[in-house]
Amino acid sequence: MKRTILILFVSITNFIYSQNGIKDWDKNYKYESAEKIIQAEIDYAKEVEKDTTEGHYYVAMDKFRFIAEFTGNERKIDSKVFNSMKRVFKVKMGSAEVLNGLVSKEFEFNIGRSKIWMPIQNQLIDDFKNELTKGKKVLLYTLFTNEHEFKGGIINTFLISEFTPE
């Protein structure tokens, strides 16, 4: 059931956007600083790793929106990031099939004092390139996945689901 809902959500993203406008996106995506999200996950991972009696593997998934500045850089999605997203989807949704063919590239952004690569849904790539240039700020709507690996360390990923240039 969860898998069906996720597939439906991903495949009709543009339809929902055009029918209900940005206000519905705002209701479903919490506004938060990307830097604060990442720092909170780093702090939580450190606490988990202190406890040697528990297993250290965990995953998280949530929706956030935030402002970022496009650096103008793009690349093919990092396989470590893609595989992490697949594991999170498998644990949280029961399947990662929805990711097949959904993402192939990442774009780099400034988020305060840090730079971060974020994968983007393939259906948004052309519009993104046409609407944004280096140094332009953008409101990103992202699906956040977090994986804390068994050996320690975390993989934080913000999958871009929609965007609005500032």
Image (cartoon, grey):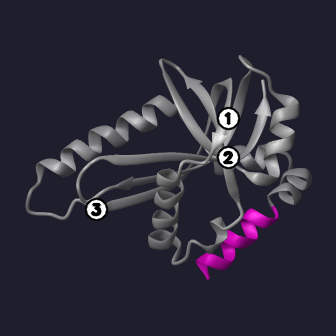
The span shown in magenta is 1-12
Badge 1: how crowded within 10 Å, few (<14), some, or many (20+)? some
Give residue 114's position: percent from left, percent from top: 48, 23
| Percent position of residue 34, x then y | 51, 33
Earlier sequence position, callout 1 versus callout 2: 1
Disc 1 to disc 2: CB gap under 8 Å: yes
- Which quadrant, please, contains the C terminus? top right
**Amino acid type indicated by mark 2:** Lys
User: Disc 2 designates what residue?
Assistant: 105
User: The residue tagged with tag 1: helix, strand or loop?
Assistant: strand
The quarter of the picture where residue 65 lies is top right
Q: Taking the image as drawn, is residue 145 in sight?
A: no
How many residues crowd around disc 2 within 10 Å: few (fewer than 14), some, or many (20 or more)? some
Residue type at numbered disc 1:
Glu
Task: Confirm whether residue 162 shows in the render.
Answer: yes
Q: How many marks?
A: 3
Identify the mark at residue 102; answer none if there is no mark.
none
Q: For the residues marked 1 and 3, what is the alpha-carbon distance in whole angstroms?
A: 30 Å
Amino acid type at circle 3 is Tyr
- Magenta stretch, main secondary structure, is helix
Residue to which mark 3 is pinned: 57
User: In this figure, which residue is indicated by the disc labeled 1?
Assistant: 74
User: Is 8 one of the magenta-colored residues?
Assistant: yes
Q: Are marks 2 and 3 in contact (CB under 8 Å)?
A: no
